[in-house]
Amino acid sequence: MSFVVLLAVVAVGFASGVLSGMFGVGGAVLTTPGIRVLGATPIESVGSTIPAILPGALSGAWRYTRERMVDWSVALPSGVLGAGFAVVGAELSDHVNGHYLMLLTAAMLLANGLSNVRSHARAPQKVSVPVGGPADAEGAEVHEHAHAAGHGHSRKPSALAVASIGAAAGLLAGLLGVGGGVLLVPAYTGLLRMPPKRAVATSLVAVAIFSVPAMLTHTLLGHINWAYALPLVVGVVPGAQVGAKVTIQSSESRLRLLMGLFFTLLALVYGAGELMSL
């Protein structure tokens, strides 16, 4: 591998880390095609991205943990159940038509993405001028700050809902070979009504757990080319810190817009690719 290609792989890792830290995903949506273009074989482009998911997710999760944004009562059950069901999904992948499942996933991402964009568009209309003077204005500002920081989520979701989301996300991740965060973040915000920042932070912990069995499996199967994997790790760790910082400093409304655009674009790419391969 030439020095230029090495730097390019590190850059791809950094960019995927930013996406991971900002949106709570694993980053393989960028690293897999990225290193494929840079010379990795198809199987290497899948397996070699896995080792970077764990440190990238941990790096972002650590940053969010310092801000107390992770909902551990959701993250740990989702991650553990999801990791187990990801193994089941991988075993079933040869017996299930993944094209239709991916189209279903793309439809879900599209619905969530458009919902976030609409929420952003409606947000300014919901802001009203306080009628009680400066005291009320100050209270409204404090409330908005707490909500933007991801602490607006006070109602604990049911254990059944958390378990169902973790199991479904893990199963689909194993079946489709996608990162769990792509499925978890929309489920957290759409079904559990989590604020976006808390959803991203919580997803990263679950994604880190998801990645452990995947990394072990691909290592044993010999799918990982460490010449690509290690530079990705070098780039993804600081990238996740940058992405998390951007999300933490963003307003709730802005983050909803960014998430909406990201998941909408991702849905269109996934959906178009699957329709072309049918």
Image (tube, rainbow, N blue to C red):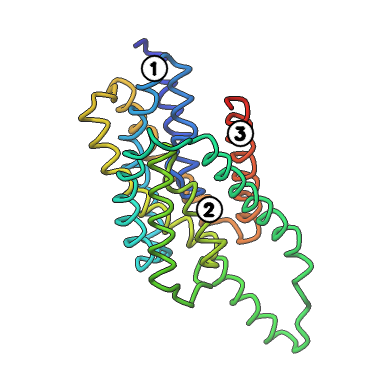
- Residue 143 x, y percent position in the rendering: 59, 77
Furthest residue in direction front, as rendered: 95
Of the image marks 1 and 3, the number of the one nearer the N terminus = 1
From the viewer's perspective, is residue 124 above or below residue 38? below
Q: Earlier in the sequence, mark 2 or mark 1?
A: 1
Which mark's residue is nearer the viewer, 2 or 1? 1
Where is residue 120? Give x, y as percent: 70, 58
Q: Residue at x 29, y 20 (%)?
A: 227
Choose top left, top right, bottom left or bottom right for residue 158: bottom left
**For the residue carrying disc 2, how many other residues have a C-alpha within 10 Å: few (<14), some (14-19), or many (20+)?**
many
Distance from Cα at disc 2 to Cα at disc 3? 23 Å
What residue occupies the far left of the structure in this picture?
220
Residue 196 point in image, percent of width and height: 54, 60
Q: What element does badge 1 sit on?
A: loop
- The residue at 36%/54% (across/down) is 206
Is the Cβ of the residue at disc 2 closer than 8 Å to that at disc 1? no
Name the residue at 41% across, 40% down. Answer: 175
Q: Give me the disc on residue 247.
A: 2
Q: Is residue 23 left or right of residue 220?
A: right
Q: Position of residue 174 (x, y in %)?
A: 38, 41
Identify the residue position indicated by label 3 in the image.
Answer: 269
Query: Badge 1, how many Cα within 10 Å: few under 14, some, many 20+?
Result: some
Determine which residue is flagged by label 1: 40
Q: Which amino acid type is marked by label 1?
A: Ala
Distance, label 2 to label 1, CA atoms, is 31 Å
Q: Is 206 left or right of 117, judged from the image as shown?
A: left
Q: Residue at x 36, y 43 (%)?
A: 89
Q: Amino acid at mark 3?
A: Val
